[in-house]
Amino acid sequence: MTFGDQGVAVSVPSFAEVVDEACKQLMDRQIKYSIRRISQMEERLTGLEQELDAFLREKS
C-alpha cells in the first residue's frame, strides 16, 4: 500500500516473537503473584509468631 511517493511499511511480528512476548508477560504475572503470596505468608507467619509468644507467656 502506498500513498503518493511515500510507502507504508507494516511490521508483522514473527510467531517466535509473539510467543516470546507472551512468555515474558506470563512470567511477569507469575513473579508478581509469587511476591504477593510471599508477602501474605510473611504476614501470616508474623501473626502466628505473635500468637505463639502470647501462648508461651501465659504458660510461664
Image: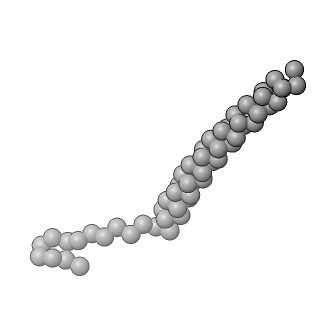
Image coords of residue 16 (percent x, y): 52, 64
Residue 20 appears anywhere in the view: no
Q: Quadrant of residue 13?
A: bottom left
Looking at the image, the residue that sits furthest to the left is 4
Looking at the image, the residue that sits furthest to the top is 60
Q: Is residue 12 left or right of residue 30?
A: left
Q: Coloured how?
A: one colour
Q: Is residue 55 left or right of residue 27?
A: right
Q: Quadrant of residue 43?
A: top right
Residue 49 to residue 31: above or below: above
Residue 37 to residue 25: above or below: above
Residue 30 appears anywhere in the view: yes
Q: Which image quarter is the N terminus in?
A: bottom left
Residue 16 to residue 51: above or below: below
Q: Is residue 52 left or right of residue 5?
A: right
Looking at the image, the residue that sits furthest to the front is 58
Q: Nearer the viewer, residue 48 or 21?
A: 48
Q: Nearer the viewer, residue 8 or 54?
A: 54
Residue at the spot 78% in from the left edge and 27% down from the top edge: 53
Image coords of residue 29 (percent x, y): 55, 54
Residue 28 to residue 7: above or below: above
Q: Nearer the viewer, residue 33 or 43?
A: 43
Q: Is residue 4 left or right of residue 49?
A: left
Residue at the spot 64% in from the left edge and 44% down from the top edge: 40
Looking at the image, the residue that sits furthest to the bottom is 1
